Image (tube, grey):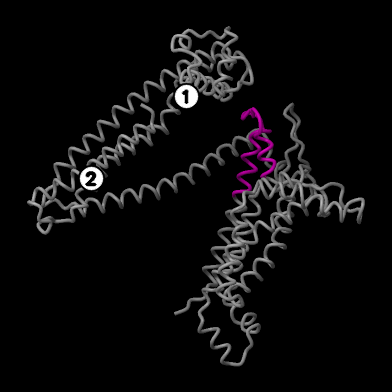
């Protein structure tokens, strides 16, 4: 049974359990709910949680672990083939997954029958055509080891799915019956349900924490592997970025880091004044009617996809700047893709980020400070400059640092607006590139994760992670240390 329908069946059983648990608890006291320890709904929720939670938890763990176990079992057969063909095992496993998925899709769409799938041969020219018709494109011919591994992959996955279905249904029914028998007047259903909900919330928090740890560990291990085959001194100190998948690469991060910081600086020069002035106007000068219109209008910018900003930079801002600063104008700009193009558009994207955070921080300043300033004879502008902004300054600085970390991690705008040249230059009208853009380019296509040219993407990502983490920690430190406490 597919995972979606299995989950639906378990949830339907939980819904039935809620109704039966509630009615059984009321029936045990002859309909007089005053004799129940808890409200009737708690007895229903007790049945629903015990029927659904263990089974759904098993499904989540199983669906995460099954691909890892199946790939481990399949990789044993592929190891010798990968060594004899001088191919990377991870790439062969990717082909196995693609072929297995394609065979399942072809079988589901009626392109191939069960007998045809079982009797397929690697010499059959119809394999690629059948998989293409099913929506799976292959970059190379299917070799016999890959086809054999794909068939084994399908068989093990199917067996695992059947075992999962049986175990999940058994656990759901067992929890259903167990909780239904507990639906009695003296059972403390409210206590049990609240403890269960608390356990679910703790589990959700643990998932978020473990996901973060998993991301960091994946970066750390691959970064360590990169520095085993490429000198760390060359990576951090070299001013040349010239990757070559044929060997002899120069993988210095300094040009990429300079481009990242330069574009982010221009973006902040654009976003901080405009966003801060907009926040001051909305919080201090605008009427309620104007604020109700202007604030959502500004925040619409935050909902625009970054790829749209990238196209705006490529098709509108770049040609506009080229017309002013290009050969027909001042002669400073050679092409529409430049640091200034990406910086201006990224600054526009960050305006609602700075404006919204600053507006909330300024509104948090107590009205009593404003009233006291007015009572001493200060004008509104003097109150804003000498009372409100100093009181809100730590939060505003934190908002700016958070905007900086957002700018450093941006990808699509710099890919389309800044160009791809890795260089150290002070001219804002030169084309440059960033760390995130090169992470994308190094992992595009069939990357060989045994080569430094592919593993460098993880070292770049780890460097970017450390920089943005440092900015976020600094922002939180400033906000907490210098935050004014008001009664």
The answer to which of marks 2 and 1 sits earlier in the sequence is 2
* Residue drawn at 54 percent across, 15 percent down: 146
Please identify the quarter of the rendering in which residue 376 is found.
bottom right
Q: Is residue 433 left or right of residue 480?
A: right
* Rendered location of residue 259, percent (x, y): 74, 50
How far apart marks 2 and 1 lie (CA) works out to 39 Å
Where are the magenta residues, as a range? 436-465
Check the image and report above or below for 370 versus 232: below
Q: Is mark 2 on a helix, strand or loop?
A: helix
Check the image and report above or below for 294 versus 134: below
Q: Which of 331 and 90 is in front in this view?
A: 331
Q: Which of 197 and 359 is in front in this view?
A: 359
* Residue drawn at 26 percent across, 42 percent down: 15
Check the image and report above or below for 87 versus 182: above
Residue beneath label 1, please?
Answer: 71
Q: In this view, does 172 lie to the left or right of 279?
A: left
Q: Is residue 113 magenta?
A: no
Q: Nearer the viewer, mark 2 or mark 1?
A: 2
* Rendered location of residue 1, percent (x, y): 35, 26
Q: Does the magenta stretch include residue 456?
A: yes
Residue beneath label 2, please?
Answer: 18
The 10 Å Cα crowd at callout 2, few under 14, some 14 to 19, many 20 or more, is many
Q: Which of 403 and 356 is in front in this view?
A: 356
* Rendered location of residue 185, percent (x, y): 11, 52
């Amino acid at each position: 049974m597919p995972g979606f329908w299995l989950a639906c069946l378990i949830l339907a059983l939980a819904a039935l359990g809620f109704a039966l648990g509630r009615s059984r608890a009321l029936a045990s006291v002859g309909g007089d709910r005053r004799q129940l320890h808890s409200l009737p709904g708690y007895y229903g929720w007790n049945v629903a949680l015990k029927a659904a939670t263990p089974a759904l938890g098993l499904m989540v763990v199983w669906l995460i672990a099954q691909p890892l176990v199946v790939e481990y079992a399949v990789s044993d057969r592929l190891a010798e083939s990968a060594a004899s063909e001088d191919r990377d095992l991870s790439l062969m496993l990717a082909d196995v997954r693609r072929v297995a998925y394609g065979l399942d899709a072809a079988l589901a769409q009626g392109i191939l029958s069960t007998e045809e799938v079982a009797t397929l041969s690697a010499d059959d020219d119809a394999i690629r055509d059948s998989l293409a018709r099913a929506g799976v494109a292959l970059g190379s011919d299917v070799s016999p080891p890959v086809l054999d591994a794909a068939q084994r992959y399908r068989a093990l996955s199917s067996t695992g799915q059947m075992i999962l279905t049986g175990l999940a249904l058994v656990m759901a029914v067992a929890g259903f019956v167990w909780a239904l028998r507990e639906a009695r007047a003296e059972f403390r259903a409210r206590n049990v349900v609240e403890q269960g909900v608390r356990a679910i919330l703790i589990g959700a928090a643990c998932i978020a924490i473990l996901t973060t740890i998993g991301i960091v560990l994946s970066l750390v291990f691959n970064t360590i592997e990169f520095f085993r085959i490429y000198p760390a001194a060359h990576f951090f100190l070299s001013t040349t970025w010239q990757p070559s998948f044929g060997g002899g690469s120069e993988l210095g991060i300094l040009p990429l880091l300079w481009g990242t910081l330069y574009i982010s600086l221009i973006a902040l020069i654009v976003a901080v004044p405009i966003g801060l002035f907009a926040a001051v106007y909305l919080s201090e000068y605008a009427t309620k009617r104007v604020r109700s219109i202007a604030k959502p209008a500004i925040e619409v910018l935050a909902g625009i996809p970054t790829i749209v900003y990238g196209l705006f930079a490529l098709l509108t801002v770049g040609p506009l700047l080229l017309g002013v600063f290009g050969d027909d104008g001042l002669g400073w700009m050679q092409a529409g893709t430049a640091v200034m193009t990406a910086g201006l558009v990224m600054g526009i994207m960050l305006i609602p980020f700075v404006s919204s955070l600053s507006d909330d921080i300024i509104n948090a300043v107590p009205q009593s400070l404003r009233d006291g300033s007015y009572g001493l004879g200060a004008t509104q502008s003097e109150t804003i400059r000498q009372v409100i902004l100093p009181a809100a300054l730590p939060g505003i600085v934190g908002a700016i640092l958070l905007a900086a970390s957002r700018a450093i991690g941006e990808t699509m705008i710099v890919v389309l607006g800044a160009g791809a040249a890795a260089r150290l230059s002070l001219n804002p009208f030169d084309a440059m590139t960033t760390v995130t853009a090169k992470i994308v380019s190094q992992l595009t296509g069939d990357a060989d994760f045994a080569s430094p040219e592919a593993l460098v993407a993880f070292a770049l990502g780890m460097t970017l992670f450390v920089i943005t983490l440092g900015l976020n920690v600094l922002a939180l430190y400033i906000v907490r240390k210098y935050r004014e406490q008001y009664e």
